[in-house]
Image: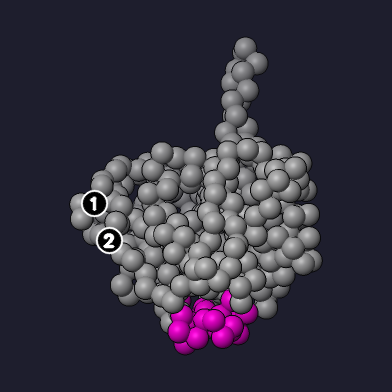
Amino acid sequence: MMKQVLVLILFSFTFNTSFSQGTVEAEFDTIFNFQFKSLKDKHQKKILIDQSHNTIYSLSYGKDTAREMLRIMNEDGFDVQFTAQEINTTHLKTTQPDMLILHGMPNDKIILDSGDKKEIVYKSPLTNTEVVAISKYVYNGGSLFLFLSHFPGGSGALPLLEAFSIKFRDGYAYHADSPGHNGGFCSHFVMTSNNGMINTKHPVLTSSLTDELNPKTIKFLCGAAIFRNPEDNILSFPKNTINFTPTNDGSADIEETSNSYAGMIGFNFGSGRVIVCTDQGIFRSLDLIIDGEKIPVTIHDPNCDNASLFLNSIRWLTKLQ
């Protein structure tokens, strides 16, 4: 099967330690198919995916990069629908999804022109009405799967994160034991239960439905740091993980060091459930070509179990386990 090739402009990507822009060649993986025991015809769960904001699905190639995610959801019997409408209470009541997916949420860039000068400001694409509607939807029994990214790809979700009492560090999670590509300041973590980065006691990983799916190795290739309660952590960062942010001169600025950072958390909120992951590409079907090296990102990486974690996550969120 042929692979399509595209060129992406990636901002502050891991191969560039100066945090400047870079051009990366990438190709879609169209071959990998995760094999699992499907729950098709055993439920009628609906998943609603946002493409009204500047998520990955607002891009022409967004669905291609999430090809295997979408296939797994369909194969497991989920009714997957996309929406280009504002996510307000009326829309959520009309569509009645069991789970809402927001995948990527950078701030909107707005240019204010006063005539004498132009000023750039940044604003969350989520309206106050949407933040209230989504939080009430979850509290009343719905579920949210929210994907963020390292700077500047997640700060647009900040109002929603605050509604769920989640602390977000808009930078790059870094640990000296897991440097990014070519020593970059956005770490490439290889997470296992042995190194304590996979929380095998989290309910996402403890149901009887997951016995054959428990992930042993997860690759988390560059993300931001979040924290809430320790028991919420699904994927934890090591102690003494640093939050780096870019500066105007392109150097690295250490904002904070913490023993409590996580890259993926999941928790109950009222009658509903929430998972937040700060590696936007953790389940996408891309091969990045950086300095001649092919880096799977990452659901099809033969050396990790990211597909298992994705399946466990959507089943837990939709209360199939």
**Residue 44 or 201: which is nearer the viewer?**
44
Q: Are marks 1 and 2 in contact (CB under 8 Å)?
A: yes
- Residue 193 painted magenta: yes
Percent coordinates x, y for residue 159 in the rendering? 71, 49
Left-right relation of 54 to 143: left
- Toward the viewer: 284 or 71? 71
**In magenta stretch: residue 257:** no
Q: Residue at x 66, y 39 (%)?
A: 86
**Closer to the camera, 126 or 139?**
139
Residue corresponding to mark 2: 31
Q: Residue at x 48, y 82 (%)?
A: 214
Element type at marker 2? Answer: loop
What segment carries the magenta color? Answer: 191-214
Residue farthest top in this picture: 115
Q: Do we see residue 187 in this rendering?
A: no
Residue 221, numbered circle: none
Give the residue pinned by disc 1: 3
Is residue 158 or residue 186 the one in the foreground?
158
Residue 122: % across, % down: 62, 36
Q: Main secondary structure of the magenta part?
A: loop
Residue 315: % across, % down: 57, 70
Mark 2, residues whose alpha carbon is within 10 Å: few (<14), some, or many (≥20)?
Answer: few
Tag 1: amino acid? Lys
Classify mark 1: residues with Cα within 10 Å, few (<14), some (14-19) or many (20+).
Answer: few
Q: Quadrant of the C terminus?
A: bottom right
